[in-house]
Amino acid sequence: ASIWRGMGATVDLFFRRELPLRGFDDEMRAAVARNMEGRGINMHAQTTLTELVKTEDGIKVRTDHGEEIMADVVLFATGDDYSQTKVPSIWAIGDVTNRKNLTPVALMEGTCFAKSVFGGQPTKPDYGHIPCAVFCIPPLSVVGVSEEIAINEANGDILVFTSTFNPMKNTISGRQEKTIMKLIVEAETDKVIGASMCGPDAAD
């Protein structure tokens, strides 16, 4: 969505929850959503597409709120936990799913697909503790658990450290983009169990 908007296209982003990028830290998701909206992306929260109709003028998109929007192109990124789409004979793994765009992850998804389809062993890919990034504007990166997951699943107390700052190179150039960083730490052991970053070069 960020890339298409950056090239000047009108972009409408539909997502089923209050914020996009389910599974990431809520504070980081909110920062990405604010930035997308600020760049002119039309955000449609808690919205599900119910019908796509091809017409002479493009694609008519209907939602569960009764909205109708005309579009030139529709990207529908969805699927179940086993990588199977709503069309039973079509499965999707690797970068095309835009879940975790990493070579080792794609190989793991391929193995799970083979076990599920040809081995008679339905197998879900395990995405635990994989460093990943979303190349939106600003970029978002995460490893380990989010604050929300840590609160719900941690065995003991946790500490949350958050910092918002202006990167040094922005100070020199005069850019006003801020970076947000968050660490999730086990209070008893001082072990870092999660880290998130949203801002320029976060993916690096």
Image (cartoon, rainbow, N blue to C red):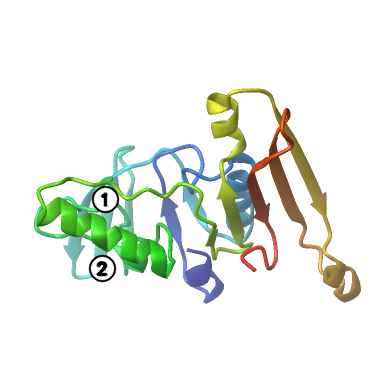
Residue 87 appearing in the image: no
Q: Is residue 132 left or right of residue 183?
A: left
Indicate the position of residue 2 as horizontal and vertical percent values. Answer: 53, 65
| Residue 184 drawn above or below residue 110 | above
Q: Tell me the kind of residue under disc 1.
A: Gly
Badge 1 local density, few (<14 within 10 Å), some, or many (20+)?
A: some
Indicate the position of residue 35 as horizontal and vertical percent values. Answer: 63, 55
Q: Residue at x 69, y 60 (%)?
A: 199
Q: Residue at x 48, y 49 (%)?
A: 21
Q: Closest to the observer: 94 or 32?
A: 94
Residue 113 appearing in the image: yes
- The disc at residue 58 is 2
Residue position for label 1: 79
Asked which secondary structure carries label 2, the reply is: strand
- The disc at residue 66 is none
Indicate the position of residue 143 as horizontal and vertical percent values. Answer: 58, 51
Q: Residue at x 11, y 53 (%)?
A: 119
